[in-house]
Amino acid sequence: MANLTADDKRGWTQNPEGVKRDILAVAVSEFAARGFSRAKVDDIVARTQTSKRMIYYYFGDKKGLYTRALEAAYLKVREGEAALDLGHLRPVQALSKLVAFTFDHHRENPDFIRMVMIENIHQAEALSASETIRELNIAAIDKLREICERGENEGVFRRGLDPVALHWHISAASFFNVSNRPTFSTLFGDDVFTDDGQSRLRIQTVKAVLAIARADVV
Amino acid sequence: MANLTADDKRGWTQNPEGVKRDILAVAVSEFAARGFSRAKVDDIVARTQTSKRMIYYYFGDKKGLYTRALEAAYLKVREGEAALDLGHLRPVQALSKLVAFTFDHHRENPDFIRMVMIENIHQAEALSASETIRELNIAAIDKLREICERGENEGVFRRGLDPVALHWHISAASFFNVSNRPTFSTLFGDDVFTDDGQSRLRIQTVKAVLAIARADVV
DNA sequence: AGGGAAATGTTCTTGAAGGTACATTTGTAT
DNA sequence: ATACAAATGTACCTTCAAGAACATTTCCCT
């Protein structure tokens, strides 16, 4: 029963890649929803077309599956980011667009956010071990660094602007917006999470980041 | 062996309040460090002067202990905030001070931050059930609301400024700074977490929030 | 002083969940 | 067509950890 594409009249068909994809997709969703310990291998398998056996066959153990799921989540998100083209925009516009995009992109990928939350709870143990992910993120910041350089050269951004610090600010808002929604809305209501509220927050976040970057803001 | 204050020559002395405090303090630290499922009741008890029996006697079950630990963490942090006096400052200075204070205060209370992270992973289940905590937070935002009103009246802040949205921005930076340190430093290095880096981030965060609030920023 | 309630110590039970053993089928190379 | 490796199915085992049972001591009230 390990076939995802079609046929199964009798017995089963081998489909290693399909099985792996199937398991990984469910694992991301399950780990993201419940965290490492609360996610149960049996539950993951139940949402799969395959058997528990295959998880251990392909991923070794629960920890191995988790690590691969984390990588898969990063890969998917970074792929989405790669589509963004900012090269033709002036620095201020490019930065504004990057912030707004990141804000929306994080909103659209709650599973990714939650995987990162879980990693942080676990002191980034699995993340540290993954060379793959480190490379992905270096690429992610290069885009921002290029904008900073152009902005400085044109004199519209402060000199000595640190792209990493800027990335920190952009991430903080965009990440917190998703990660802390449960507690925040419980304590302060849902207003900032309505469409209008989110739209206001996005604008404010752009303004806040520009205030840090621009040379003409006191 | 359940005495925290002094004597134990033979047998033991009853000390209900001390025992509860002892358990709660360890529970906060343990839950914050490992999350709900990975925190083990036996481990908590091991760091305590009491026995497992007492946890179930006073807190019912693990979940009950967790809820009380969450409340304890909130209480402690909100107490620290209450010490902050802003009434005599002009709005811009008051807001600046509040932001800088929050930034530092979150840094100094990583256990609280981590408890909130865990709550968010768990969809704020325990938080929703706690009336106590809700009240604490309403009080927390009143201070900010008062600053906003004064600032609007003096014409230095925009009209229609939403204190909750402002709180969102302040929290986002201050919270993310602690919550995402493990993954962020793994991916982008420790620079922003050195004393100098943190000092720069704090200044930038103040500037960013002011840019949102002030009437004279484009 | 003594009796009942509150607090604490000690030991055991049990279920869930991660992981393994063993068996079988499918695909592929010669 | 056959033999071997890869892929999958099924059933079981083991351990860990939450919580309960049972026993004892301390405190307070009259």
Image (cartoon, coloured by chain):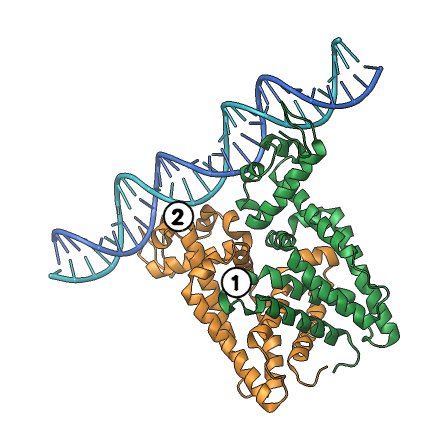
Chain colours: A orange, B green, C cyan, D blue
Q: Residues within 10 Å of mark 1 (few under 14, many from 20)?
A: many
- Above or below residue A192? Residue B25 is above
**Residue B157 appears anywhere in the view:** yes
Q: Which mark is residue A52?
A: 2
Is B87 positioned to the left or the right of C3 in the image?
A: right
Q: Position of residue B111 (x, y in %)?
A: 62, 52
View extreme (right): residue: B153
Disc 1 and disc 2 in contact, CB within 8 angstroms? no
In what element is the residue under mark 2?
A: helix
Q: Which residue is mark 1?
A: B183
Q: Position of residue A53 (x, y in %)?
A: 36, 48
**Residue A104 appears anywhere in the view:** no
Pointer 1 and pointer 2 on the same chain: no
User: Who's the residue at 35% across and 61% down the image?
Assistant: A17
Q: Position of residue A13 (x, y in %)?
A: 31, 56
- Above or below residue D10? Residue C2 is above
User: Who's the residue at 81% across and 76% down the image?
Assistant: B158
Which amino acid type is marked by label 1? Thr
Which amino acid type is marked by label 2? Lys
Chain of the residue on which disc 1 is drawn: B
In what element is the residue under mark 1?
A: helix
Quarter occupied by the N terminus of chain B: top right
Quarter assignment of residue A168: bottom right
Near-viewer residue (C12 or A101): C12
- Above or below residue B27? Residue A196 is below
Q: Position of residue B42 (x, y in %)?
A: 54, 37
Q: Which mark is residue B118?
A: none
User: Who's the residue at 75% across and 47% down the image?
Assistant: B132
Q: Residues within 10 Å of mark 2 (few under 14, many from 20)?
A: some
